[in-house]
Image (cartoon, helix red, strand yellow):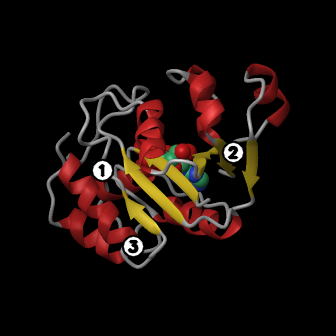
Amino acid sequence: MARIGIFGGSFDPIHNGHLVVMCEAVEILRLDRLLCVPAARSPFKPRGTTWSDAVRLDAVREAVAPHPSIHVDDCELRRPAPSYTIDTIRDVAERHPGDDLFLLLGADSLGEFPKWKDIAAIVAAVTIAVAVRPGHVIDRTALAETLPGIRMVELPTTPTGVSSTLVRSRIRAGLPLLGYVPESVARRLADATPSA
Ligand code: ATP
């Protein structure tokens, strides 16, 4: 039985915080494979993304290329928006029958998590693996009360204060991206025009 991680997000753009979570989750959870799944559009981000699907996907591919356990899965970009995690989980479960599925989330996502579409089905299908994010607490007790039966592990990943919002504001201000995104991603973004 393989251990498969799923890490979804807007990746608008992907940054070093995402990479730390993914690389360390592979080690901590002993994942055989981690699927990095860029969303077409998150139901919680109705304004859409700054970068086009193609640019975000290219940047994600560039960023994970040096990491053999991390695979880019474009299933959400191939479905109409909005992108629902339950559809992705069902898709991955069909491709990986009998395998153990782990859904990776940053701690900031926990607030909205109980409102996700078909949350009971999500909780039944996967173990939730929550990565620390500066400024966000992980309240296991509250989550277990709201979502009885939830299987959850905390990931003691290295905290990083990087976010896509911060990267976008640095780009707008003409500031360097060294330390915020991999060099290959910085080059890809420099060649692209933001779509919004
Ligand atoms: P934005 O700033 O545009 O809201 P973001 O940086 O939060 O974006 P997303 O692509 O929305 O990035 O996030 C995808 C997943 O990665 C979410 O589960 C989020 O909580 C997690 N995540 C993003 N950045 C970090 C970080 N620095 N540390 C831990 N988790 C993170």
Which tag, 1 or 2, sits closer to the chain's start?
Answer: 1
Where disc 2 sits, the SS reads: loop
Separation of marks 3 and 2 at Cα, in angstroms: 24 Å
Which tag, 3 or 1, sits closer to the chain's start?
Answer: 1
- What residue does disc 3 label? 182
Count all numbered tags in the image, as a single digit. Answer: 3
**Residue 131: where, in percent of width, then height?**
66, 52
Q: Is residue 123 left or right of residue 181?
A: right
Amino acid on which the number 3 mark rests in the picture: Pro
Which tag, 3 or 2, sits closer to the chain's start?
Answer: 2
**Residue 14: where, in percent of width, then height?**
39, 58
Amino acid on which the number 2 mark rests in the picture: Gly
Whether 80 is drawn above or below 183: the answer is above
Residue furthest to the bottom in view is 66
- What residue does disc 2 label? 135
- What residue does disc 1 label? 74
Where disc 1 sits, the SS reads: loop
Q: Residues within 10 Å of mark 3 (few under 14, many from 20)?
A: some
Which of pointers 3 and 1 indicates the residue nearer the eye?
1
Q: Is mark 1 within 8 Å of ligand 1?
A: no
- In this rendering, does residue 176 appear at all? no
Q: Is residue 80 left or right of residue 23?
A: left
Residue furthest to the right in view is 141
Q: Is mark 3 within 8 Å of ligand 1?
A: no
The front one of 100 and 5 is 100
**Residue 170: where, in percent of width, then height?**
37, 57
